[in-house]
Image: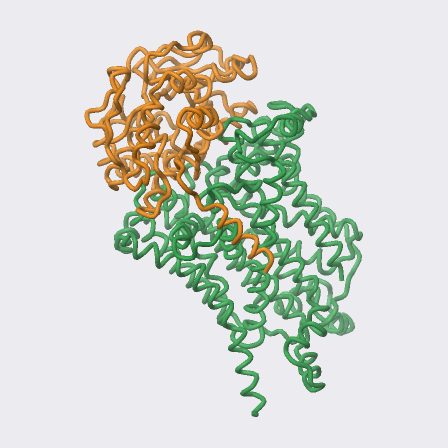
Amino acid sequence: MDKSHDRILKISGATLPPIIFIALFSILPLILLVIEFKPRDVRIIFEENLGIIEFTFVQALISAILVVLLGVPLSRITARRRLPKTFDVFLKVLSKIPFVIPGISMALGFMLFFGRKGLLNILLKPFGMSISILYSFPAVLLGHVFYNIPVVVYTVGTLWEKIGGEILESAKIDGASDTKILLRVEIPLLIPSILSSFLMAFTYCFTSFAVVLILGGVRYSTIEVAIYTYLRILLDFRSALALTILQMIFLAGIAVLRYTIGRNPEVFHGETLKEKMRTSDWIYLTALSFAIFAPLFLSLMGGFVERGGWKFSLDGLRYLFQRTWESVLGTNIVDVFKDTFSIALMASTISTFVALLSSRISVFHYPLFSVIAYIPATISTVTLAMGYVLLEGIFKLSEVLMISLLHATISLPMTHMILESAWRRIDPSLEDSARVDGAGTFRVFSHVQLPLMWRGLLRAFTLAMAISMGDLAGVITLSRHTFTLSSAIYRLFSSRHVTEALALNSIMMLVVLAIFALGEILGED
Amino acid sequence: MRFLVISLLISLAMLTFGKLVVYTYDSMISGLAKYIEPMFEAMYGEDVVFMSFGDAGAVLSRLILEGDKTEADIILGLDQNLLLKAEEANLLLPYKPLNWKKIKEEFIPEDFHATPFDFGAIAVVYNSKTLKKPPTSFEDLLNPEYKRKLVVEDPRTSSTGLAFLLWTIAVYGDDFTEYWRKLRNNILTVTPGWDEAFEMLESGEADMMVSYATDEAYSYHYYRSTKFKPVIMKEGAYVQVEYVGIVKYTDDLELAKRFVEFMLSDFVQKEIPLNQWMFPITDVKLPEIFVEHTPKIEKVLSLNPESVQKNLDRWLKEWTKVMTGF
């Protein structure tokens, strides 16, 4: 049999699972909604919401530019500098946390830090200064930087680590300065991945909901807010669908743009030069950590301080474990943890598996596949979850499984992106030489590629877990009996058990931190 | 694979047989529902299961989505405006309970698409430690001394925020935009939900928020604290009435009817104040805490639900325009 023909057959076999997955769990729910509730004319919706659409676009553009401007130097530090081992792990773990923070907790962190009575203003007081940044456009930008910096560090940082050291060495021998190497060698090589992370950040800022509302206040609201209003306040599904479709078309355009940005993977199979941290690096890192991670810490501490003050207190934790929550949650805290983990594990298994196939195809065979894997990011989560309610009527699966599938779907663009960069770091000639030795696709993967991709898989897996744990809209819409930590926190808040809600929130953040730390430590190269 | 099998088993086990399924909003489950459930089961010997999908709007949207495939027999906790949406979507089976005469006169509906079971009022809640002179009227609330002290919830994402917007419309009619234009200076920020607003009040970031008339009674009951006090504006109170309705697709109409009757019984009505933190719809005796720690509702303002239904989209757009410039 003709060998190339054989290979094409194998590829098409591998393309099926991702295509079926996306078709069933991203497209079908929307189609069901469209059939059930005929969407309004997209053009009319566009005209009616023009102001919000414009603002959504502008804020996403400015945010994404800022994310890249701040994220690239951070990627450089993680890639090109020798950080103390513990600090390196610490940094990588912390940078993932924003993905899992529930809106309320993020708001709390920012308020405790930047608020009128926040830490920053307490620190500035002796100097007669005060800062009032919340509820303004800069606060929105800050929030978006906070949430999207990991995207840049993933895409750019991981590739940066693989720019062959010999390229940099030879430039050095030619007498090029560090800045010159950065501008003439490294940045040009990384442009596709920088642009790609820019567009990814743009998409996430475009569909941003809680950050914009909580940090910016009402003056700054996005299309996603309008969709939510149609769905939940006006119960006008037809307008909501039209707006969802409009947003989807636009973001699909962005996805195609990402795809058309060519890539040049050949140089990314080396090991880059690691250099010593300079003073400027430390200053940058400290300033960024302070601005971005301080709110995070404060939010983490939210469960351990006395309400409305700065005094350490374990009351919240005590209440949480002393009282029985059957009556509030209909289940106990232990079961909440169990369900959270089963859903997160199932979701990340599915997501990582689908992304492993889709990213392999998009890297080695059909780059267009990255557009397909990106589809879930273009659909409003609330709308998607409502489509799943209709899907439930067809598939008759358990709600735990439905929630897991939804979470696998919403995390797919991220897992796909992480695994794309993992595949790109593998030298394709390895596969060819293994094949020459007669190894089949699976054998090549399990014996040659898997050992090399281990860390990428772990990253994708833990991130998908985090996204699953962080989701609220999906769980609330779909679940009848099941609680995850996020929805339990929501329930505690809505029944005014604020102290306990914050304590559980702190626990959730600690759990996620532990998962990530484990992932980073075990997955260390 | 094992997960798959386990999940399938769980889903099989969850198939419900012959019990009453009640859809309701989230905080009902931890409030009134935990009293209703054992009582109803003891009285009628039938299981009752409560399910929730977020706030009342989310619950109704879930019911609309499920349509005739729904498991729900009862929908509990729709307010007067959502009720109209439910009627419009043709989801309810009208039923006039036998003991309808127990309902306070002003709340007796013309048709019984659903039955009212409690009511509550929106209020401006303030921190009495930091704000010595709270506003007493909507006009007073515009006073520059309250500059950037008030947090309101976004009516586009929060039912509390929506109720507050409707309150201002009940007072000012179509001139409400003018009012909000002036109120803007005193608003610190607009939060997406009640939680964030409460968090700001509690942390001292804001001095006033839009919340409920029973807040002080609540915090006195649980924490013996009267730090946060509600004010009902002189112009009159905006009242939210909550309804219990029978879902058209119920497979046990008799049991559903019994549930509606049950909601009007003294057993349930007397539990409403301290569990639901609302006012009972019948004349049962109020607990002492309610008498002492809730503001008097002297005048009730009302907005015709049909008018809300017809204009809400436009009102929200106008509000957005005033607040955001879009």
Along the viewing direction, whichever of A347 and A449 lies nearer the viewer: A347
Residue at far left of view: B110
**Which chain corresponds to the colour orange?**
B
Which quadrant of the figure contains the C terminus of chain A? bottom right
Residue B164, position as x, y percentages in the image = 35, 26
Residue at far bottom of view: A1
Which quadrant of the figure contains the N terminus of chain A? bottom right
Residue A470 figure quarter? top right
Along the viewing direction, whichever of B136 and B194 lies nearer the viewer: B194
Residue A189 shows in the view: yes
The figure's colour scheme reads: by chain
Residue A3, position as x, y percentages in the image = 58, 89
Residue B174, position as x, y percentages in the image = 23, 28
Residue at far front of view: B45
Q: Residue at x 49, y 69 (%)?
A: A259
Residue A146 shows in the view: no
Residue A277, position as x, y percentages in the image = 78, 54
B293 in relation to B25, above or below = above
A271 in relation to A120, above or below = below
Determine whether, in the image, residue A131 is placed left or right of residue B167.
right
Q: Residue at x 40, y 55 (%)?
A: A391
Residue B236 figure quarter? top left
A135 in relation to A19, above or below = above
In the rendered picture, chain A carries what hue? green
Determine whether, in the image, residue A296 is placed left or right of residue B60.
right
